[in-house]
Image (spheres, rainbow, N blue to C red):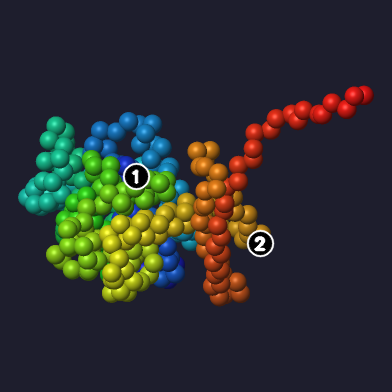
Amino acid sequence: MLNGKKVLFSGMQATGNLTLGNYLGALKNWVGLCDEYECFYSVVDMHSITVRQDPATLRKRARTLLMIYIAAGIDPEKNCLYYQSHVSGHAELAWILNCFTYMGELNRMTQFKDKSAKHADNINAGLFTYPVLMAADILLYQADVVPVGIDQMQHLELTRDIAQRFNGIYGDVFTIPEAYIGKVGAKIMSLQDPSRKMSKSDENPNASIYLMDDPDTIIRKCKRAVTDSEGQILYREEQPGIRNLIDIYSACTGKTPEEVVKEFDGKGYGDFKLAVGEYVTDIRYEFGTVPAGFKMTEKATVYVYVPPYMANGYNITNRVDCGGSYQGEWDSSTSAWVTRIHRAPIYTKPTLPKTGY
């Protein structure tokens, strides 16, 4: 407990670009947790160096991730946002906890086996003891709860075992953390292989939608998403590609899968993929234009950028969703309009008629 609230800890690695799956599945749900918990959100850059990193690139990615936390709506005045490497206690506690962790426990970690297979040329001790550093991240702040996915549950169980073992020897030193079971985030799968989660380290550039992708790239990736030959938009296990696109559309619009199926009844895959891409683009713009500082804006100005390659007469559909708190209540407004491009003709100096004077 801290300031009368339970403590919550979570973090993300600064390797690669965050995906739509990271945002919809986790980051989006972190925003409002500070009302109930004392939240610590870390950029876990020390975990990143189990794989070889260029120092300048890693620093840049770490800064970008911290900015993404803020841009997503995590208020730094209400939450503790920090770089893991800037707090020496993480490494110090990890060494102590290493001395209370058994080799057999680490050998059973499935993620070590998976990552060893992926990085067979660099199976280092840091990769092996990775779960102990994760335990130090959690126990350092006496975290009561930790939001974890199914793939991280084994690591949380190890953290609990280490803390209980330490407490059994030295008394009640560490809080025993529990898994945070809150609002279930959307589980977004790969666009090219719907049997696997969307990953920021996927080698196929069309498999993942990244938060920093531009709108054209997002729509192109959605259009290329793997589906099937059924020709029907139904939410069922037999159509994993369509099911994944329905999950994305549902997460972006707030509609249930059943409502999505009804909305696109009788329509083709092409129309549906385009609609998914357009709504994901809305999420991207909402995500990318939130300014840091959280200051009130009385008169907002919207700028429409027209790329030079767009032809005369081309139409651009614009939509703006605005919201804010006023006198304790949330108020929102939506505006939409169409921008038609009118290219000015090339100016030529007129030739004056001869008058005889």
Residue 67 visible: yes
- What residue appears at the point 37 percent right and 45 percent down from the top-left corner? 217
Q: Quadrant of the C terminus?
A: top right
Residue identified by numbered label 2: 298
Residue type at tag 1:
Asn
The percent coordinates of residue 163 (x first, y second) are 21, 59
What element does badge 2 sit on? loop
- What residue appears at the point 41 percent right and 71 percent down from the top-left corner? 36
Q: Quadrant of the N terminus?
A: bottom left
Of pointers 1 and 2, the one earlier in the residue sequence = 1
| Total residue callouts | 2
Q: Could you say which is closer to the camera, residue 130 or residue 61?
A: 61
- The residue carrying pointer 1 sits among few (fewer than 14), some (14 to 19) or many (20 or more) residues within 10 Å by Cα, namely many
Q: Could you say which is closer to the camera, residue 280 or residue 32?
A: 280
Q: Are marks 1 and 2 in contact (CB under 8 Å)?
A: no
What element does badge 1 sit on? loop
In this view, 150 is above or below 341: below
Residue type at tag 2:
Glu
Q: Could you say which is closer to the camera, residue 252 or residue 87?
A: 252
Q: Could you say which is closer to the camera, residue 286 or residue 191?
A: 191
The percent coordinates of residue 48 (x first, y second) are 28, 41
- The residue carrying pointer 2 sits among few (fewer than 14), some (14 to 19) or many (20 or more) residues within 10 Å by Cα, namely few
Q: CA distance from mark 1 to mark 2?
A: 33 Å
- What residue appears at the point 55 percent right and 44 percent down from the top-left corner? 312
- What residue appears at the point 42 percent right and 49 percent down from the top-left corner? 215
Q: Which of the 4 image quarters holds residue 274?
A: bottom left
In this view, 159 is above or below 36: above
The percent coordinates of residue 42 (x first, y second) are 37, 51
Residue identified by numbered label 1: 17
